[in-house]
Image: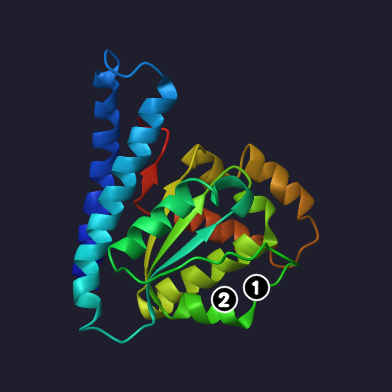
Amino acid sequence: MKEENSALVHIMHSIVYKIRSLSLLNDTVSKPMDVQHLGFIIAEQQMISAIVSSSNSFSTACSKKYDVFLSFRGEDTRRNFTSHLYEALMQKKVETYMDYRLEKGDEISPALIKAIEDSHVSIVILSENYASSKWCLAELSKILDCKKDQGQIVIPVFYDIDPSHVRKLTGSYEQAFAKHEGEPRSNNWKAALTQVANLAGWDSRNR
């Protein structure tokens, strides 16, 4: 599992370089959003390649139902980055869990907990409103428990959010926790965000 993790981390670091190189396309790409779109395509393909490569060895490790679990804030990324990533992974026959249900209440369902436990890799897509969802924060805490107890690979994706806002709980993340005041799990959630923000991953703003 450690070798698989190292390979994924190496690929994620290479994404930043590849997306920065898109700035050289300014003479042929007329709109900044085109560069952003191309960057997302490259990022998705790099992640997919890494996961597909690693998934070949998953079958020889402990048996799990899913190769990848996607944790995301639906209102931020469901219809763009997350859905594109899910479709591309499934096309490559990487068994991926994406919850299509709207978040309801503060507690994640037993079925969702089981899906997290039954995955080799979790990709956590940290976006502007991720921390405003108690559902997402509960997911993240469970994912990091699986990382600790089962050696699950965890890859953070900072989607149009400064990683330091996640790590230091500033900006929209600070505002989110002001609304979570009095929540007994708040300190655990803060620690989980700091932990995931310190893992090697991908920053979508580096393009």
Q: Element at badge 1?
A: loop
Residue 20 rendering spot, x and y as whole percentages:
29, 29
Would you identify the image quadrant in which residue 60 lies? bottom left
Q: Quadrant of the N terminus?
A: bottom left
Whether residue 99 is visible, yes or no, is: yes
Residue at the spot 63% in from the left edge and 66% down from the top edge: 101
Taking 73 as reference, is 54 left or right? Answer: left
Q: CA distance from mark 2 to mark 1?
A: 6 Å
Residue 79 rendering spot, x and y as whole percentages:
54, 48
In the rendered image of this protein, does residue 115 appear above or below residue 179?
below
The residue labelled by disc 1 is 108
Taking 197 as reference, is 112 left or right? Answer: right
Q: Nearer the viewer, residue 96 or 198?
A: 96
Mark 2–mark 1 CB contact (< 8 Å)? yes
Q: Residues within 10 Å of mark 1 (few under 14, many from 20)?
A: some
In the rendered image of this protein, does residue 180 appear above or below residue 34?
below
Marking on residue 93: none
Disc 2 marks which amino acid? Leu
Disc 1 marks which amino acid? Ile
Q: Element at badge 2?
A: helix
Taking 40 as reference, is 98 left or right? Answer: right
Residue 155 rendering spot, x and y as whole percentages:
38, 57
Taking 167 as reference, is 186 left or right? Answer: right
Marking on residue 112: 2
In the rendered image of this protein, does residue 137 appear above or below residue 161?
below
Q: Quadrant of the C terminus?
A: top left
Residue at the spot 24% in from the left edge and 35% down from the top edge: 17
Q: Nearer the viewer, residue 160 or 81?
A: 81
Q: Nearer the viewer, residue 171 or 111?
A: 111
Q: Residues within 10 Å of mark 2 (few under 14, many from 20)?
A: some
